[in-house]
């Protein structure tokens, strides 16, 4: 989530320092908490053993060149029914239909990690 400055490991900023200092009880509680990790990825995905390598692996999973044209190719290559999950607005629903989607699922499927995502 580049927009909100999310990174692994977290990068300290003035805003994050203000946030932390404004929540002393939470900070004390976190000092005694076990280390956080993504157990479903770290140790299971190739070359991901800690949060630093998780950041690199996560960035490799996204292809910024992906386009609606690719969806048309997938539909033609697949030949079966194609359901697109993650549609958040009417314009994308129309585009999905025009590119051959047989159905859509309205979902902000990353909403629990991206609290700035629109509600679905």
Image: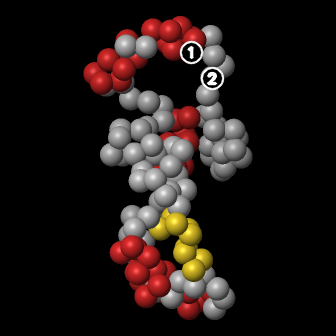
Relative height, residue 34 to residue 91 (above, below): above
* Residue 14 visible, this angle: yes
In the image, residue 19 sits, relative to residue 72, either above or below, namely above
Badge 2 is on which residue?
A: 35
Q: Which mark is residue 30?
A: 1
Residue 52 horizontal/vertical position (percent): 52, 35
Say whether residue 37 is left or right of residue 91.
right
111 on left or right of 34 = left
How far apart are the two marked residues, 1 and 2, measured between alpha carbons? 9 Å
Identify the image quadrant of residue 21: top left
Depth check, mark 1 against mark 2: the one in front is 1
Q: Residue at x 37, y 13 (%)?
A: 22
Please rate how many residues cluster around mark 1, counting C-alpha atoms within 10 Å: few if below 14, some from 14 to 19, many from 20: few
Task: Point out residue 88 in the picture as x, y percentages from the top left corner.
Answer: 44, 64
The secondary structure type at the circle numbered 1 is helix
Tell how many labels: 2
Identify whether 17 is placed above or below 3. above
**Residue at the extreme left of the image, as rendered:** 14
């Amino acid at each position: 989530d580049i927009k909100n400055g999310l990174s692994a490991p977290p990068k300290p900023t003035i805003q994050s320092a203000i946030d932390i200092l404004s929540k002393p009880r939470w900070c004390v509680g976190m000092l005694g908490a076990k280390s956080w990790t993504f157990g479903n990825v770290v140790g299971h995905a190739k070359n991901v053993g800690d949060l630093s390598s998780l950041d690199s692996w996560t960035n490799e999973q996204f292809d910024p060149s992906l386009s609606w044209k690719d969806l048309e190719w997938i539909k033609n290559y697949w030949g079966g029914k194609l359901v697109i999950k993650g549609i958040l607005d009417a314009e994308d629903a129309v585009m999905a239909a025009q590119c051959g989607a047989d159905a859509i699922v309205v979902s902000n499927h990353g909403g629990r990690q991206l609290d700035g995502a629109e509600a679905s």
